[in-house]
Image (cartoon, rainbow, N blue to C red):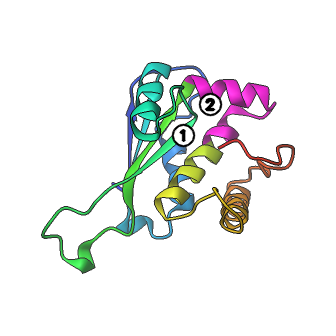
Amino acid sequence: MPVEIQRQLELDGIPDDQSLSRYAEAAIDDPGRSEVCIRIVDEAEGRALNLQWRGKDYATNVLSFPGSVPPGVPPDEMPELMGDIVLCAPVVAREAQAQDKPVAHHWAHLIVHGVLHLQGFDHIEQPSASLMEQREREILAGLEISDPYRDNSHGSA
């Protein structure tokens, strides 16, 4: 299975597993050779992970954790992408409401954003930030989701 879903909590507005997988697979270059785990967490876990790995003491919307290939896996059997994407459901819901966008669209954007991080994209400096945003727009358009940066010039992820 290229996408595993883990739910630490259930909240209204979180898309079903099939939708979450579809969002991730839309951003994965080769879904047949790739693996990703999407974990949905509450604010306590989101805050703890953000503090542990980024030194920031608050829950953030999405975190990406590249995985490593286990020793002994032949190069031709290595997945193109492995890693975990952690989404903090309450933060995602609040942001969608504050940005006046459908919550499912925000989930899609953040999952696409997380997968792109796992594939090496970054948004810290230009021109890589522009390249990442353009790739997000293209993938989301393929999912029939409007440009997430249209009314938010700095992005949300």
In the picture, residue 66 is in which quadrant? Answer: bottom left
Is residue 53 found left or right of 91 in the rendered image? left
Q: Which residues are magenta?
A: 90-107
Circles 2 and 1: CB atoms closer than 8 Å:
yes
Residue 100 is covered by the magenta coloring? yes
Residue drawn 53% across the image and 50% down it: 114
Give the farthest residue toward the front.
55
Residue 21 in the image: state x and y as whole percent. Answer: 48, 48
Nearest to the observer: residue 123 or residue 119 = 123
Residue at screen point 55% across, 43% down: 19
Q: Residue at x 52, y 43 (%)?
A: 20
Q: Seen in the image, is 141 located left or right of residue 48?
A: right
Q: Is residue 5 above or below residue 32?
A: above
Q: Which mark is residue 92?
A: 2
What is the CA distance from the residue labelled 2 to the residue labelled 1?
8 Å
Query: Is 118 located above or below residue 46 in the figure?
Result: below
